[in-house]
Amino acid sequence: MIVATAGHIDHGKTLLVKTLTGVDTDRLPEEKARGISIDLGFAYLPLPGGDLIGFVDVPGHERFIRNMLAGVCGIDFALLVVAADDGIMPQTVEHLQILHLLHVTRGAAVITKSDRVEPERVREVQEAVAALLQATQLSGAPVMPVSAVSGVGMDGLREMLVAEATRSGGRKTEGEHFRYAIDRTFSVSGSGTVVTGTVFNGVVKTGDKLVISPAGLEVRVRGIQIQGRTAERAAAGERCALNLTGADLAAVHRGDWVLAPALHRPTRRIDARVSVLAAEAHALEHWTPVHLHLATSDVTARVATRRGDAVAPGTSAVVQLVLDQPIGALRGDRFIVRDQSASRTIGGGFVLDPFAPATRRSSAARMSELAAFEHDTAEAALAELIRAGERPVDLERLETAYNMTPERAAEVYRAAGIQQIGKDARLGITAARLKAIGDAVVAAVTGFHRSNPQSAGQEIETLRAATAPDLSADAFTSVLRKLADERKVETSGSTARIPGHNATANAADDTLWQTVQPAIDAAGFNAPPIRELALQLKLKEPLLKDFLYRKAKTGAVVKVTADRFYTRTTLATLAAIAQATAQAQPNGQFTAAQYRDWCGVGRSLAIEILECLDTLAITQRIGDARKMRKDFVPILGAATAPPPPPKGNTAANPAAKPAVKPGTPQRRPAQNYRR
């Protein structure tokens, strides 16, 4: 259990801790000389079972309220200290307001110096303090008169603290990543950088690799100490010192976090619920400059209210905090807001969404998200997000905001019936919603085929906009992949189609195919480019090109190059020639020239055919040679290679060059002319 003192200057906080623990928490020479606490002091009270009560002694002077705020973050119990002679003073009130705003619900008030005044005065101060506590989170807390000098009441105070520590039972550590707020940094000769602070979440062990945030420095835990003794681990709710390697002392500061890499996500925009103190004279208006104290950090910020509304004293509202520099924060982190000059506490609150967007802050969808983040647990927030609408849930953001390990997150998603989609950014969606999107996609593509029978498929981006505009392109690709696994949809490039859809299955394309197929077959291994084929068949080149590309989707023809197509049967024969050429070589490898000679085509065309076979994974290029990689039959169908041409006659293969049609103009042989 971690206990923090609070109260006005010179009310005996440091002497109280010293009497309880035997440790003088004033360590600075200036503190010794002036007799006041300036910075945080730390002490421990060992318990019979081996546990510890950690004490954080905070300065009481108003000038050092920043240090006080760094000390009371992450505590379990507060001791509000009020001197019997002075009674309630300004910093008594402000410190109590801070404890209230930080939602410290466990604590006690201690009336010190009770031996210096009459019993009536002690009772008077007790009653005043009890009345002051009534309007705070510490309402009903015990008010205990003590004297650290005479010892009166100290045994009872000590017994009460031990009982509270036993009752608390420690904080939850399972299912959370490690997070630690730095409140002090120094260097030790021979060890390097050492930081002290409070473990907010999880567990740290020697050797762990962590990150200094928000700077993003990667460090390793070289050693751990608790109460000056070496320890192998430290858990949430404990104070400890960490010896870190990987970061120079100058790069580590109070206000930084040491945390698991999964939690390193600095932010400069935080949506939060802010409460303004009832004692404030003015409302908190839009774009008010403030000091934000979160954990041990102190940064300047602006308060952006919704639609420019003001937050009246004694009320709360959801606002956005726009920070001047990045910090680390998670959902539920408590904070204090002070005025621009850092001289007055205005209010405080807790983080709703640590990764707030800059735009569309007042949209209905955003309001639903913020309503979900009002819940303290990830389970409740997720349930609210599911109920609020059909928008997918950003799982990485949810896991980070609520500090869930992958194992813990998997349990939460399983219980909520959430399925994950997306690769670049994981989104969560209910099974019912996923099925509805899948059904909508199938229906949309089916309707598209009905209206556009000659189209190979519907553009995926158009399909996404029509069926699931709230999904990212990456997430929609995951949905299509799932539908493809179920054989409901196929994708090719940027289009989607129903399996078995034939973009050429219509009367016009059937007639065209009866014209084109014989011409391609007649060309044999020397399939002409689209331009030449269009001239030969007296067809428009764009029309023929569109038809062949659509026909290629059916598998009837295969695109060898961007403007050259073969029927599947012809390409199967060319693959059989490649196989036969490889089998004819001692090492099973053949060159493009050897393949060219067997096919009887030009070298450039032979290389284009081989590159197509490479793409189909039938052949594999190795330097200047190739080998067979797979059996071509399952890919193209069965075929037999024609016999190789006689040596010295590479044009003897009848399939390589079609016979000249009657009436085709012949080119004259080249002649030499002399002058």
Image (cartoon, helix red, strand yellow):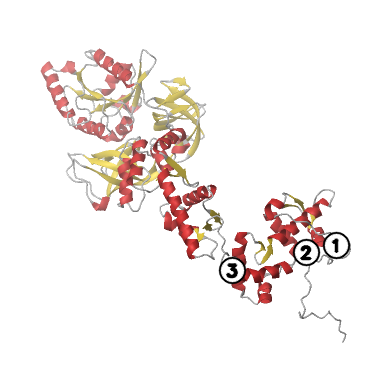
Badge 1: residue crowd in 10 Å (few <14, some 14–19, many ≥20): some
Q: Residue furthest front?
A: 507
Residue 321 seen in this snapshot: no
Q: For the residues carrying marks 2 and 3, which lies nearer the camera in this image?
A: 3
The residue identified by callout 1 is 645
* Label located before the other in sequence (2 or 1): 2
Q: Does residue 66 appear anywhere in the picture?
A: yes
Residue lying at the far left in this picture: please name it.
120
Residue, disc 3 = 509
Mark 1 vs mark 3: which is more N-terminal?
A: 3
Question: SS at mark 2?
Answer: helix
| 622 vs 296: above or below | below
In the rendered image, which quarter contains the N terminus? Answer: top left
Q: Amino acid at mark 3?
A: Asp
Vertical order, 564 against 358 (above or below)? below
Q: Secondary structure at mark 1?
A: loop
Q: Amino acid at mark 2?
A: Arg
> In which image quadrant can residue 578 be found?
bottom right
Please say if the residues under marks 1 and 3 sit with CB atoms less than 8 Å apart.
no
Q: In whole angstroms, how far apart are the C-alphas of marks 2 and 3?
A: 34 Å
From the viewer's perspective, is 646 left or right of 610?
Answer: right
Pointer 2 and pointer 1: residues touching (CB < 8 Å)? no
Residue 181's spot in the image, x, y percent? Answer: 39, 33
Q: Is the C terminus in the top left, top right, bottom left or bottom right quadrant?
A: bottom right
Q: Name the residue that disc number 2 marks.
A: 603
Please rate how many residues cluster around mark 2, counting C-alpha atoms within 10 Å: few if below 14, some from 14 to 19, many from 20.
some
Three-letter amino acid code at the position of disc 1: Pro
Q: For the residues carrying marks 2 and 1, which lies nearer the camera in this image?
A: 1
Nearest the eye: 538 or 469:
538
